[in-house]
Amino acid sequence: MKVTFPHMGYAYIAIEALLSGLGHEPITPPPGTRNTLELGTRYSPEEACLPFKTILGNMLEGIELGADGVLMLGGWGPCRLGYYGEIQRIILLDLGKQVEFVTLEVPEGGLPKALGLARRILGPTDVKELWLGCRLAWAKMNAIDELENLALKVRPREKDHGATSRLLAREFQRLRGAATIKDIRAIHQETGQGLLDLVDRRKPPTGMRIGVLGEIYTVVEPFVNLRLEERLGYLGVEVVRTISLPKWVEEHIFQNAFGFYTRRELLRSAAGYLSGFIGGHGLESIARSVDLAQGSVDGIIHIFPLACMPEVVAQGILPQISQDKDVPILSLVVDEHAGEAGFQTRLEAFVDLLQRRVRVCQ
Ligand code: SF4
């Protein structure tokens, strides 16, 4: 089957390796653009959140490229994500797209469910290829995560504006083509060194650190968050990530499948502010805000799509955390009408506010 899937930053590199290992041909849609969003918005219910529209746009562009299968992530709980896959399947059907639609429900409910899911997505492959595909996908996902985290430290001090992003884009294409674990390790190491060489040693670190959290798709997909990490880096800010895709896969897929996943740690951090799961990443946003506020960040940015219920609840709680922990928190809401100029102005004003606070405290 030729399978397309939604974008989530550079995760497509790992997803391609996984799909190949499963015996499918991956059809990667083009990176998200205004066209993707317009396409998705045209066929989406008006009140659907931004991820729904962008993902539908990715699917339609992937189908245009010849995909006859669609892979989508499902969910459960109070968040609407749980039924998005089904609505998207119906929309595609209404548009006359004859595709096999597979929704990956994160298997909450033990090993039998996880095995049932694995059988649904398994194509014509042998065990050896499957094993290699899984290992390559995992190694690529971890390499991307580590290198992107390193890039967050390098970007505020890069010699040439944009050099960090250009290097990552180039080296990740090499990583995409890597067919062995040895090649992945070599590219990982060379890219890490390449990133360090971009640092302008004469430029003193600003020391400004901002934690970023919120709805997972919005946090990790640069098209949707208007390249938030890059913009902050160019303002001299080191971004501290709170969401890591490998960690998410480990906890929500593997630990869940074997019944080991627990929210105990999150609930402990969020104690006094939120006492239960509210769907999506709402609980994580509260727990991570508390953790970050007790750490060494100068401020926190909370980003989410308009009408995202779990994050709207979190947004209502964050001012209390900001007051209690004395850390500025900026909530940014994005939708299909978000403009780059207004977004940039808000970021600059927030960074300016943090710099003034740091100066006053010195
Ligand atoms: S978490 Fe928010 S943005 Fe994501 S699917 Fe749920 S409601 Fe939509």
Image (cartoon, rainbow, N blue to C red):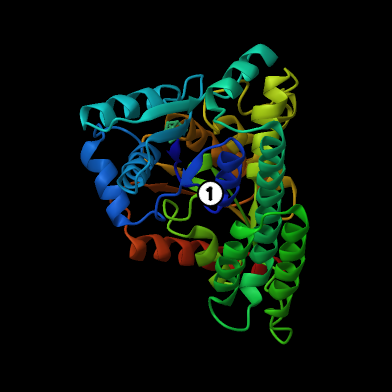
Q: Vertically, is 84 above or below 152?
A: above
Task: Kindly indicate the quadrant of the structure image that contains residue 4.
Answer: top left
Question: Which image quadrant: the N terminus?
Answer: top left
Q: How many marks overall?
A: 1
Quadrant hosting residue 233 = bottom right
Closer to the camera, 270 or 160? 160
| Residue at 65 percent of width and 37 percent of height | 248
Tell me if 112 is positioned left or right of 219 in this view.
right
**Residue 271: image x %, image y %?**
69, 27
Find residue 317 and report its image quarter.
top right
Q: Position of residue 287 (x, y in %)?
A: 66, 35
Query: Which amino acid, by three-letter code, is at mark 1?
Result: Tyr
Residue at point 53%, 49% (across, down):
12
Q: Does the residue labelled 1 lie within 8 Å of ligand 1?
A: no
Q: Which of 116 and 251 is in front in this view?
A: 116
Q: Describe the element under mark 1 as helix, strand or loop.
A: helix
User: Quadrant holding ligand 1?
Assistant: top left
For label 1, the crowd category at 10 Å Cα-Cα, with few meaning under 14, some 14 to 19 and many 20 or more, is: many
Residue 102, compared with residue 227, is above or below; it is above
The residue lying at 67 percent from left, 51 percent from top is: 140
Residue 301 visible in the snapshot: no
Q: Along the horizontal axis of the image, is 344 left or right of 87? A: right
Query: In the image, is residue 316 above or below residue 204?
Result: above
Vertical placement of residue 322 versus 251, above or below = below
For the C terminus, the image quarter is bottom right
Residue 359 horizontal/vertical position (percent):
65, 71
Nearest to the observer: residue 360 or residue 53:
53
Q: Position of residue 261 (x, y in %)?
A: 72, 23
Q: Can residue 16 be seen in this view?
A: yes
Which residue position is annotated with label 1? Answer: 12
